[in-house]
Image (cartoon, rainbow, N blue to C red):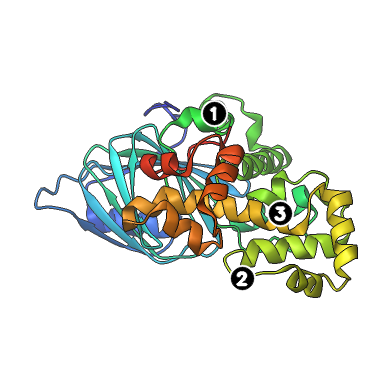
Amino acid sequence: MIGGSGFLRRHAVFRTRDLDHARQHNNSVFVEHALDYLARERHLDFRHRQAKLGSVAINLMQYGAGVLIKAPPFTDFYLLQFTLAGECRVLHDGLHNILLAGSVAVINPFQAFEKTWLPGARQLMLRIDRQLVEREFRAWTGCDEAGRIEFDTSPIRDITKVGTLSRYVRMLCDDLGGAGSDLSRPLVADRVASGLASLLLASMPHNRKAAIEAPGRSIAPFFVRRVEQFIEEHARDPIVLADLSGVAGVSTRALQIGFRRFRNTTPITYLRAIRLDLARIDLANAGLANSSVATVANALGFGHLGRFARDYQERFGELPSETLRRGSVGRTR
């Protein structure tokens, strides 16, 4: 478990038993949203502590009673949620996710969502600026544009699978809760916030993961990076090598040489890796839509199920059916 109610104890607590008062407070912290009780029992005991860390805001929050939040897209920040106690439920991008104690999940800036807080739920929520995440992605990969970074919204139920991220957050909370923290210094806060954004990109599954894992990306020529970005944005579409040559603006031979020299792979192999990553996310969510391994594989252009299963197991250390049955991404080996 990442921690408990003692987090941020040096920071003032905002507390109210009035639902409208709680809503108005949260509107100023996040975005304007609807907030209503779940049932007739209306024993609200809303508590909120917040610490600022450059482009990051750390929030410890609980409602006491069961409430339902309906919120528009954030547009300019991600919300990293550690469930410390109880249970929350999130409807986001058409998917229902249950956030149990000990789990971690992300809400993206791009879609409206509904969130149910059951009585007794408590969360540590980190508001991380979208620009910070995109800045770290560009610095890491050498991409001219970060593009749209979308995290898998399925919760990781075993927090030890993102151990470095959770320990980093715990360290921040412990330091902010003590006297004489140097995190109040703006330069230190900016560097620490950048580290948090990098760990978020490294730890949590998202649609641009392959770009981070690619070796030596920052020294690759622009046409290689441009093709990689095109693949990441259009991997679900039918793509052939000639399409990629057109995007690159170079011959097929030059494109192949560029990928072999700077990526130690081929454009089509890179495309296949991106599609496998997408398949993993789709399989984790397939049970909610009563889908199957074959349906997911075919939708991503994997016509030969046997080869798909073999490649999938080689990349992730488990069969597609295991991901489907578990219903979460977990962590690759």
In the figure, residue 5 lies in which quadrant? Answer: top left
Secondary structure at numbered mark 2 = loop
Q: Residue at x 34, y 33 (%)?
A: 101
Element carrying mark 3: helix
* Three-letter amino acid code of the residue under disc 3: Tyr
At 43% from the left and 31% from the top, the residue drawn is: 158
Q: Which numbered mark, 3 or 1, is in the foreground of this view?
A: 3
Residue 311: image location, x then y, percent: 60, 44
Q: Which residue is at a point 54% across and 28% down the rendered structure image?
A: 163
Q: CA distance from mark 2 to mark 3?
A: 14 Å
Name the element at disc 1: helix
The residue under label 1 is 163
**Taking 205 as reference, is 133 left or right?**
right
Q: Residue 1 versus residue 30: which sits nearer the camera? A: 1
> Relative to the observer, which residue lies in front, 7 or 9?
7
Give the spatial CA distance, label 3 vs label 1.
28 Å
Which residue is at 56% across, 27% downward?
Answer: 171
Look at mark 2 in the image and give the residue it sits on: 238
The residue carrying mark 3 is 270
Closer to us: 272 or 58: 272
Q: Which mark is residue 236?
A: none
Q: Is residue 41 left or right of residue 233?
A: left
Q: Mark 1 or mark 3, which is nearer the start of the sequence?
A: 1
In this picture, is 121 found above or below 152? Answer: above
Q: Are marks 2 and 3 in contact (CB under 8 Å)?
A: no
Amino acid bearing label 1:
Gly
- Quarter of the image for the C terminus: give it: top right
Can you see residue 87? yes
The image quarter in which residue 180 lies: top right
Mark toward the viewer: 2 or 1 = 2
Residue 90 pos. (x, y %): 34, 52
Please rate how many residues cluster around mark 3, counting C-alpha atoms within 10 Å: few if below 14, some from 14 to 19, many from 20. Answer: many
